[in-house]
Amino acid sequence: MEAQSRYTIWLWVILLAGLALRLLHAATQPTLGSFIHAEGDSGWYLAVGWGFFSGQEHGWIRNIPFTNASIPTPPAYIIFVGVFQQFLGEHETAIVIRLLQCLASIATAYLTFRIGSLLGGPRAGLAGAALAAFHPALIFEPAEITTETLYIFFLACGFWLYLEYYVAAACAPVGSRLSARAAIALTAIAFALATLTRAVAVLFPLGLAAHILLLRRRRLTGAWRGHVTLLLTIYFAILSTWTIYNLALWDRFVFVSDRLLPAIWRGLETEDGTPQQNDALLLAGEEADVPEGCEIDCGYHHPPELYLERIGEIIAGDGASLIALRVRELAYSLLQPHGTTRLGSVSVRDAAQDWLGGNRALPDLLAIMRIEGFALKSLTWLFHLGGIGLGLLGMILSRQRWPIAAPLMGFALYTVLAHTVVLALPRYLFAIEVVWLIFAGCALAAIYERWRRRLGRETAEA
């Protein structure tokens, strides 16, 4: 009981310190700048969020166009940032969004503790929570008005509900506070909200259904047909609300998002860049078939047939170069930490590579250490690469707890495989950072336990 109380105290210290760091960073960021930069995602989300509640089919806000009839992304984050603009000013809206995202981010660290405790005990959970609370990228991200923080939070909620109240309860029935059906229903809601925030997770609940079947084959759960049916019914019913909305109001069929083909094309195209550059590449000298009156306001999107044509042309070309491109892009996106570019425009990695490939002079090394944001960038690299290395070790050490570990490992694999097909960027793979940290906590706890046993033996022998 005393040990449990000690873990609780340390957990509160970690979470409060992590929340303070997030709030301090968010407080230093400009608020109005997020609204007026049309070239950034923040300005776009805020403009489209305002437009979603405006009652207009299309229009402009702060020099950024919005088009309700053809919103390309899932709606959850657009609604989230749009609703506050209906009754708050721009400055206050940015503050409230960042405050809520800071709370969601530190809640993710808490859920990391809960999930890690299921895998390796409270010490593993505490180590994972500390990594999540003090990871620089996870500290900086809530201040950005982008989807990542809420997406990761909904994913963490889904995994926690599924693993603690369904899987763990099935493996060791001890009177859970939730019934199996309630746990499955809440899991479906959480993953549906995650998918309506970022579309890449759309097929992952099918993997959970396969996991439930595997539990049944190992005789760890019963009524699997009803649980799978409930999971997928609730999940797809929630996703279908966006489809129904678009059909009813705009006579447009879209399931979650219509950005699949553009994402595949961008993953294959070597010269993609800004929207204007992408338009030029897609059209390749052809005239766009833009509906009359849509040159300015309608946010016109290229038809799927054009993307399919361009994708076919690329695939029919040099297959070996295409495979090499996808491997390079995926490797870069996995190994490069998300969020370092906002710490300074000069790349520490590129500078270090140049130094290693040159004469390795001491003055040049000192110049690298004077690069803007060097310390924070280096710390971010340490957390990222250390998290991956320890996470892989933790996965190996957790193999005996496969009912808990498999869904987490499966999500990491699913995300990586999905981005072998669609465009891969460090930002798009950022969601699996928490998975690495959960298993890294297990590895650190195992290393500590082994060191403590060894120290105890040496003390006894002495």
Image (tube, rainbow, N blue to C red):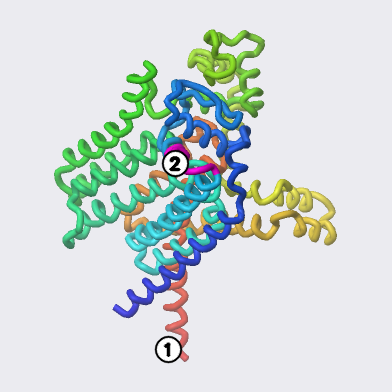
Q: Residues within 10 Å of mark 1 (few under 14, many from 20)?
A: few
In the image shown, does 154 or 412 lie closer to the viewer? 154
Q: Looking at the rendering, in which quadrant would you find the N terminus?
A: bottom left
Which span is picked out in magenta? 82-90
Q: Which residue is mark 2?
A: 87
| Distance (Cα) linking label 1 and label 2 | 68 Å
* Residue 145's disc number: none
Residue type at mark 1: give it.
Answer: Ala
Q: Are marks 1 and 2 in contact (CB under 8 Å)?
A: no
Q: Position of residue 193 (x, y in %)?
A: 36, 40
Q: Position of residue 171 (x, y in %)?
A: 22, 56
Q: Residues within 10 Å of mark 2 (few under 14, many from 20)?
A: few
Q: If you read the primary sequence from the N terminus, does the residue marked by circle 1 or circle 2 appear first?
A: 2
In the image shown, does 36 or 227 lie closer to the viewer? 36
Q: Nearer the viewer, mark 1 or mark 2?
A: 2
Task: Please state if 170 lies on the left or on the right of 129 as rendered.
Answer: left
Q: Which residue is mark 1?
A: 460
Residue lying farthest to the left in this orientation: 223
Q: Residue at x 55, y 33 (%)?
A: 44
Taking the magenta stretch, the answer to whether it contains residue 153 is: no
